[in-house]
Structures are given as C-alpha cells and as structure tokens.
Image (cartoon, rainbow, N blue to C red):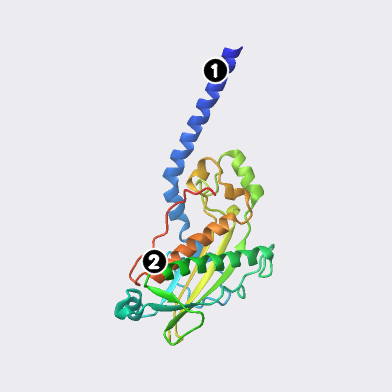
C-alpha cells in the first residue's frame, strides 16, 4: 500500500511539474503578444473629461504613455537638464488633483480608495523627485512657480477596482482564456487606472500633454503560479503608480530626445 501511495504521489508530482513547465513556456511565448496586442487599446480608454485637450496616440519615441502631444522646441529644457551654464531646470509640481476624476459605479473622486491612491501617487512621486533632486544636477524642485520654472499639473482621471472574486476563480482554474485566446496578463479583472499630465513652460505656455490608461499587469511568475495582487483590492494600482513615477522621474532627468522604454513584463508578484 505504501509503495502504491508513493507511486501515486510521484506521478502526481510529475504531472504538476509538466503542467508548470507547459504554462511557463506558453507564458514566455505569449507575453510579448499580450503586450503588443494591448498597447494600442489604452489610448481609447483615456477619459475625455476636459483635463487633456490634445489627444494624440503616442508613437513611443519619447513617452511610454498612451497619448502624447508636444509643441516645445526643447532647446531650453535640454540645456538646463544637461546642466549647461551651471544652471539646472526649475520644476514646480502642483498637487495631484481629483477634479477631473471620472465617476464609476463604485468609485468617485470622494471615495476613500481613490483619495488613498491619489495620496500614494503624490507621496511616491515627490519622494522620488526629491531623491533625484538631491542626487543630480538636471533639475531642482521649487515650492512655487518662478520666472524660470516649468509647471507640471497631474490629474488622476479614472479607476476601477480589482475583481478579486474573478481572480480567485481564475487562479483556481490555473489560467483563463479570453476571447483573444491569450493567457491573461492584463485585463479588467486586475482593475484599471488612468492619469494625465500637463507641462507649462516658464512663460505659462502649455507645451506638452500626456496621458495614460493602464490595466493591472500580472507578473510573469503570476501567470504560472499566483500573483498576490490578484487578491488585494488596489495592489495592481499601486504597481501602476510605481511604474508611472519611474517614468515621470526619467522625463525630468533626460533630454527630450531620450526614449523612455517601459519594461515588457514584471517579475514582481507582490
């Protein structure tokens, strides 16, 4: 009996190992397809609610965000970011606003969850920019607009919560096939978040607008095992914000010609 039990356990373990390897290989093959198929969709999902006035689908040469419009000549910005004439670029960041937030069935601008996301975005962004300010000579933050400062306005535009029950069911099944036939990497079940940014030059002229819409992105390990963000209401949203913060920080520390590339996948299941 013990021998039979041992064989059964060994057989089961081998089946699970094969299943794991099979799913891992599929995930690795499909992850590029997942991203390439979904990169164009976010542009249509950005709320048209008055904050952004110039919607242009990004070509990905500068910004990794879904919409990007720019009319600046960039010479002054590049000169200061490069630290020429011993002068870095002054930047004033206005507090992130919820004034343009698109209300949904469960969330609006006054929802505690939305306010916490806004505060997390604000705190994480300012902490990173202050760190960059202290360690580099490419820009410096100012507490109020000055005759030489760029002004940046940021708005949280929309959010939908993670569908935890759907994710529990998907996790129990191992993987889910949608209408596209692709393994789930990004979907409405992971929740969504969108934001917009407006840039003004020292003369107060609007010189650039950018906006992004993102579904929560499941990590690569999460495609074959489990992603803990599936079971926490706004963990995916915080990961989206973390990614945005890194990208915004790169904008402030590089010349305009620098291309900001977003990672194709995440390895962090937390």
User: In the drawing, what numbered circle is on residue 102?
Assistant: none
- Asked whether 255 or 100 is in front, the reply is 255
Where residue 93 sits in the image (x, y, percent)? 50, 76
User: What residue is disc 1 on?
Assistant: 7
Circle 2: is it few (<14), some (14-19), or many (20+) Cα within 10 Å? Answer: few
Counting from the top left corner in percent of width and height, residue 165 is at 66, 48
The answer to whether 261 is drawn above or below residue 180 in the figure is below
Left or right of 172: which side holds 86?
left
Question: Circle 2 is placed at which residue position?
Answer: 59
Dot in front, 1 or 2: 1
Apparent side of residue 233 relative to residue 207 in the rendered image (left or right): right
Quarter of the picture containing the N terminus is: top right
Q: Please tell me which residue is depicted at 46% across the width and 59% down the height of the picture.
A: 39
Asked if 13 appears above or below 251 in the picture, the reply is: above
Q: Nearer the viewer, residue 84 or 150?
A: 84
**Residue 231 x %, y %:** 62, 48
């Amino acid at each position: 009996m013990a021998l039979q039990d041992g064989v059964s356990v060994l057989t089961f373990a081998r089946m699970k190992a094969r299943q794991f390897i099979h799913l891992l290989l599929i995930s690795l093959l499909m992850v590029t397809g997942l991203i390439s198929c979904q990169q164009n969709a976010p542009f249509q999902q950005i709320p048209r609610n008055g904050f952004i006035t110039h919607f242009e689908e990004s070509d990905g040469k500068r910004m990794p965000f879904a919409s990007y419009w720019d009319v600046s000549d960039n010479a002054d910005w590049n000169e200061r970011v490069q630290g020429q004439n011993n002068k870095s670029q002054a930047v004033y960041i206005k507090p992130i606003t919820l004034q343009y937030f698109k209300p949904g069935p469960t969330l609006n601008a006054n929802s505690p969850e939305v306010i916490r996301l806004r505060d997390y975005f604000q705190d994480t962004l300012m902490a990173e920019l202050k760190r960059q300010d202290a360690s580099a000579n490419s820009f410096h933050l100012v507490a109020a607009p000055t005759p030489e400062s760029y002004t940046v306005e940021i708005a949280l535009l929309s959010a939908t919560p993670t569908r935890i029950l759907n994710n529990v069911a998907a996790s129990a099944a191992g993987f889910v096939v949608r209408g596209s036939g692709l393994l789930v990497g990004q979907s409405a079940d992971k929740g969504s978040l969108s934001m917009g940014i407006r840039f003004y030059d020292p003369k107060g002229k609007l010189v650039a607008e950018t906006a992004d819409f993102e579904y929560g992105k499941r990590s690569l390990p999460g495609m074959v095992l489990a992603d803990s963000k599936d079971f926490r209401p706004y963990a995916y949203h915080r990961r989206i914000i973390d990614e945005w913060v890194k990208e915004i920080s790169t904008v402030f520390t590089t010349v305009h010609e620098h291309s900001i590339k977003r990672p194709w996948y995440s390895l962090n299941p937390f």
